Image (cartoon, rainbow, N blue to C red):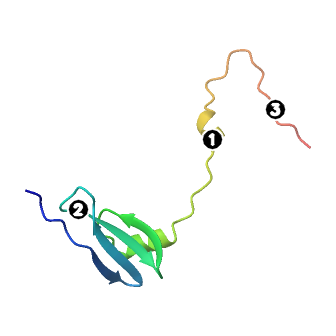
Amino acid sequence: MALPALERKQYKLGKYDIVAQPVLGSAHMLRYTVMLNGRRLGALMSVPNESDCRFMEAPPPVPPLRIFALTNRPGRPKKGVIRPRPEEL
């Protein structure tokens, strides 16, 4: 005996349209798709609030990756090595 699947629901949250669709293979879980002016912004597995929708519309800027700073970890200097001096102009 199969469990009855949930039906598709649609509602508005501020200026965003939310479409709740059942997840395939699940009787209770819903996938919430966030749309703005007919354009899909993203999808969540939990009920979105307006703050989540704003974050999907305009995510904060991500700083550039600094690979050298993460991989270069100089240790203690060896004995007898003359420390390099920065050249002055």
Comes first in the chain, label 3 or label 1: 1
The residue singled out by tag 1 in the image is 67
Distance between the Cα atoms at labels 3 and 2? 63 Å
Q: Amino acid at mark 1?
A: Ile
**C-alpha span from label 3 to label 1:** 25 Å
Say left or right for 60 vs 81: left
Q: Which residue is mark 2?
A: 29
Give the mark toward the camera: 3 or 1: 1
Residue at 81% across / 32% down in the picture? 85
Which image quadrant is residue 1 in?
A: bottom left
What residue is at 27 percent from the left and 58 percent from the top? 24
Going from N to C along the chain, the mark reached first, 3 or 2, is 2
Q: Position of residue 35 (x, y in %)?
A: 43, 76
Badge 3 marks a residue whose secondary structure is loop
Q: Is 61 rendered above or below residue 15?
A: above
| Front residue (pair 43, 66) | 43
Query: Which mark sits nearer the N-terminus, 2 or 1?
Result: 2
Nearest to viewer (mark 3 / mark 2): 2
Q: Which mark is residue 5?
A: none
In the displayed structure image, the side of residue 88 where residue 63 appears, left or right: left
Q: Position of residue 60 (x, y in %)?
A: 53, 65
Q: How many other residues sit within 10 Å of disc 1, few (<14), some (14-19) or many (≥20)?
A: few
Q: Which residue is at the front of the view, 8 or 60? A: 8
Give the residue type at disc 2: Met
